[in-house]
Image (cartoon, coloured by chain):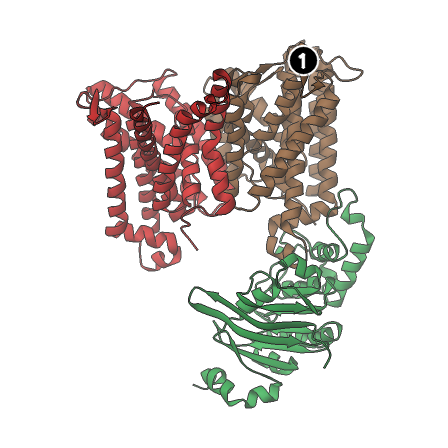
Chain colours: A brown, B red, C green
Amino acid sequence: MDNLRKEWLLNALLAAALFMVPFWAWIASEPFIITLATRIAILAIAGVGLNIALGLGGMVSFGHALYLGIGGYVAGIAAHHAFHGTPILGLPGTNQMLPIWAIAMLFSGAIAAIVGALSLRTSGIFFIMITLAFAQMGFFFTLSWPAYGGEDGLPIFMRNQFPGLNTARPWELFLVAYGVLILTLGVFATLRAARFGAALMAIRQNPDRAAAIGISPFGIKLVAFILSGMITGLAGAMMADLTRFVSPAMMAWTMSGELIVIIILGGVGRLFGPVAGAAILVGFEVFFGGLTEHWKLWLGLVLLAVVLFARGGLIGLIAGRAQNG
Amino acid sequence: MSLALVLEQLLNGVQFGLMLFLMSAGLTLVFGVMGLINLAHGSLYMIGAFLCAAVAGATGNFWLGLVGGIAAAAAAGALIEVVVIRRLYTRDHLDQVLATFALILILSEGVRMIFGPFPLYLNVPDMLRGTVSLGIVEYSRYRLALIGFGLAVALGLWALIARTRLGIQIRAGESDREMIAALGVNIRALYTIVFALGAALAGLAGALVGAIQSVQVGMGEPVLILAFVVIVIGGIGSIKGAMVGALLVGVIDTMGRFLLPRIFASFLDTSQAMGIGAALASMLIYLLMALVLIFRPKGLFPAHG
Amino acid sequence: MAEPVLSLKSISKSFGALKASDDVSLTLHTGEIHALIGPNGAGKSTLMGLVSGKLTPDSGSVWLDGTDVTGLSVARRARRGLGRSFQVSSLIPDYSALRNVMLALQACQGHSYRFLRPVNRDSALRDGARSILGRVGLGPRASVEAATLSHGERRLLEIAVALALAPRCFLLDEPMAGLGSEGTARLVGFLRELKREAPILLIEHDMDAVFQLADRISVLVYGRIIATGTAAEIRANPQVRAVYLGEDAT
């Protein structure tokens, strides 16, 4: 079986397995597991976002937690005002997921446009550090800005609503997250196969060549960075609804690190890389976290081994190198 | 707001900046010579603080603790370099970031396993307790000693790099790796030494700061990020840049936190002013870094052309 | 004489105290191959950078098709018809030969901000790329990744990519480098045909190839052009013999 087929089979298997988890939880009557599966799906959406910038475009953003946090705070603030019946900038709050998602993507996209336009003037380690610096600004801003909870964070008393579903039920919330995940995976696959993806991946491999045939790296990378921030922002809004809580910790640099880890564990630039990576990370936390309080030591060792010896991540390990031909 | 208070804050800023310099010097050397981003540098700071607190606690002697902290950080640095870091020199930045991120997880949990989950406390040595009079301000004797310490180490580092054989090899390593290999320098050993030297400086900073803060797991990461801000502002690979960047960051951060809420209080009500002032102050150095990178994309003192 | 396709007007560029290009003027006309030769360190790569847009000159200007392109980026110059090949093969390593050429076609036929339609089903790109690969003799190797092609094949792919841009002029940086004598002979024949499509500014180390191919030759020494003329004129030029060929004689 060739590698391309293997990857498709593995992807289908991952998608099916994630979908089956809640059934298993229902049979085993462990509703907690449904929440885990929802968390995996939402982390995977955030990872798909980062995978556009990092996997396709080679932009090592060490500050994607910023967009996660922006999305989270949009959801939190909208729900806060809806709950208290107070207006924000003259507009009423809302507890509907769809408009919240739109606003979250708008805001994270706008901030990503500013951060990207400034950061893409640099490259290499400077790019890593400047994206980190912008995320730290967001982190410290939310930490010391008292209006929405400051370092205590902001609770969402009533989970936001999705038309036709009862999001208070774990199973229905999972469906929402799973649906959005499949949609974003579709967006990723379409982008990658289109002219835009061809140009973006070419720029990653050889920016000088891309420029010499007339493709300006800056514009293409900036658009990719903005799309990337928007999808991660969407995941942030959903994450806030899952935990019914937002806090500056969503923007912490360790969160940015975790998002990169998700992609690396799964496979950089691979369609289902973030899904595999999120499943490994959450699974690891739950399984080893139950065995030992020092599970992070083992996570560190596994991560180190993957970086040093298995650079393709899980999907690379099973399906071989990425095919771009 | 009295002049004495401003002066005290200014001295605090300089003291903070010099401790940041100790952290940044190692980070910038390792990047300049080996081209490596080391996120685990903060863990070496933590190891220095923990070992200093443990040895000082067991012997009752701060200075023995300090030596122990430096030695432990240097040894840990050398060990990490030989086992892991060495494999990363030829890898891209993404791999370096991830592998050293993994090292943070391993070292933090390792320290937690050995020393337990609770913070340790490290006392200021008796001879440095209390305050000393500097004309208009009574200043902490220990913090003043930290300033002296920082300056002395900076001077020593400068002498090491400018005047010694090792320094010549380090400078050659920054400009041309093939050439020093051709000159018959043992690059592997040189890299291990440079890494251990950076680790020792981080350990020293951790031990010194440990006496004015609590010694706990995770103490290294905030300092690590500040040290990155410092070397990016200063120009990665440049010791001089690290010094200038460290003092800038130390003074601006300290003075910002002190002054901004007071400035806002002059035209806003106090609670609002405190909030906005504090929010802005905590973002100030990141703003500075972003500005520097936008106008000088390679930092203030670019090490290479 | 008709207006040149490409012209450099009194271009100068210094790096610190080093004058890498010193008042260089040069033209490229329809139908010709203009070769640029010179000893190592004469400033050929600097000049190449100035023409392609990687470097900006301290003074002087670059004109393409009658417009001043001095202030334009590499990508914008490429879109205006500057087809460049690289000295060291510089392709998209993970892309197949076909996709390398398709990417160039995509870049020259409009823009890359199309997010929906898969390139693989874009028959205009695919068929166009196939026929160009056929022209340079790489047809059977279309689906091989650039990174696994042989050195000679990569040089041909460089030419194919430049061809795909349907440029107003070609900028070829040492296309013969590392080719065997057989490969060089084939490429010489190919370039002779290529110049009918668009003129070629050729930087080349292989003197035999240059003297066979070039309609005009310019000799660059220490950043200055010391002579321009036909192959026969350059051979006979005493200054060139002293500075340049003299090195071979000793």
| Residue at position x 67%, y 13% in the image | A86
Residue B94 horizontal/vertical position (percent): 52, 40
Farthest front residue in view: B267
Farthest left residue in view: B127
Q: Which residue is mark 1?
A: A86
A297 left or right of A32 in image: left
Image quadrant where residue B69 sits:
top left
Q: Give the camera-side residue of C156 and A185.
A: A185
Query: Which amino acid lies under the numbered mark 1 shown in the image of this protein?
Result: Thr
Residue A235 horizontal/vertical position (percent): 65, 26
Q: Height in image: B301 above or below C230? A: above
| Residue at position x 79%, y 44% in the image | C117
- Which class describes the residues within 10 Å of circle 1: few (<14), some (14-19), or many (20+)? some
Q: Is residue A262 visible?
A: yes
Q: Height in image: B153 above or below A297? A: below
Q: Quadrant of the N terminus of chain C?
A: bottom right
Q: Give the camera-side residue of C84 and A321.
A: C84
Q: What secondary structure is marked by label 1?
A: loop
Q: Give the camera-side residue of A113 and C97.
A: A113
A212 left or right of B40 in image: right
B217 left or right of C180 in image: left
Count numbered badges in the picture.
Answer: 1
Image quadrant where residue B71 sits:
top left
Q: Give the camera-side residue of B33 and A106.
A: A106
Image quadrant where residue A8 sits:
top right
Residue A143 horizontal/vertical position (percent): 51, 22
Residue A231 horizontal/vertical position (percent): 67, 31
Q: Is residue A52 visible?
A: no
Q: Quadrant of the C terminus of chain C?
A: bottom left
